[in-house]
Image (cartoon, rainbow, N blue to C red):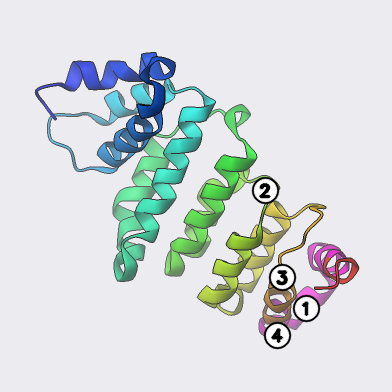
Amino acid sequence: MAAFKPQFLDSANHYADLGEHRQQFAAFLTYAALGPTDGYAVEEFRSAIGKLPQAGLEESATALSQALESVADQREDYWKNRAQPFWQQVWPKSRDLATPRIAESLARLVVAARGEFSTALAAVKDWLRPIEHPHYVVHKLHESDLCRRFPVEALQLLNAVIADQQWGPRELGQCLDEVVQAVPQLAQDARYLRLREYSRKRGI
């Protein structure tokens, strides 16, 4: 990695020229930035990832969520020691770069953080947007039991990623049930009421 550092980092300037390999480059750059990678400074990774076009950032966000999802029982440690520092120190700060695809990856990241769910949501919340197909995110949220453990934050996440998509996630109703079972007062929350009505209209 040290031997070809200048060429590796400079490739971010030529993302479009990488052709069919550009997605792999964005993912590899992200994994390297998650580290530890000897001979590379945080500033160098921040600069390289900051030069990626929006499509490259979408690939980077996908790699970030997949990295956290892949560590199984070490997710909380991986979030604290790798993913959170990456987010704070490397990821671009301009929210104008946010897209529904990035939002979907970040929603998956938040769910994958498990016990660090609240911290992860607080970190990425300003990048969240309604996503085209929220089914997988809602499925993973329901499966994780996070709606019972973190009902307020789970409602916040659901409200951020679900707008008026034509096809509602079939486990949304179960997630909402778990939220109000954990904190009954949330049944009066405007976000809960909106999502419950959305769920009712779509028969889920």
Image quadrant holding the N terminus, namely: top left
Mark 3 lies on residue: 172
Mark 1 lies on residue: 185
Query: Badge 1: how crowded within 10 Å, few (<14), some, or many (20+)?
Result: few
Q: Quadrant of residue 18?
A: top left
* SS label for mark 2: loop
Which residue is at the front of the view, 123 or 20? 20
Mark 2 lies on residue: 131
Disc nearer the start of the sequence (1/2): 2
Tag in front: 4 or 3? 3
What is the span of residues highlighted in magenta in the rendered image? 179-198
Disc nearer the start of the sequence (4/3): 3
Q: Residue at x 79, y 68 (%)?
A: 192
Query: Looking at the picture, how far across and down is residue 29, in whole percent?
Result: 31, 33
Mark 4 lies on residue: 181
Tag in front: 1 or 4? 4
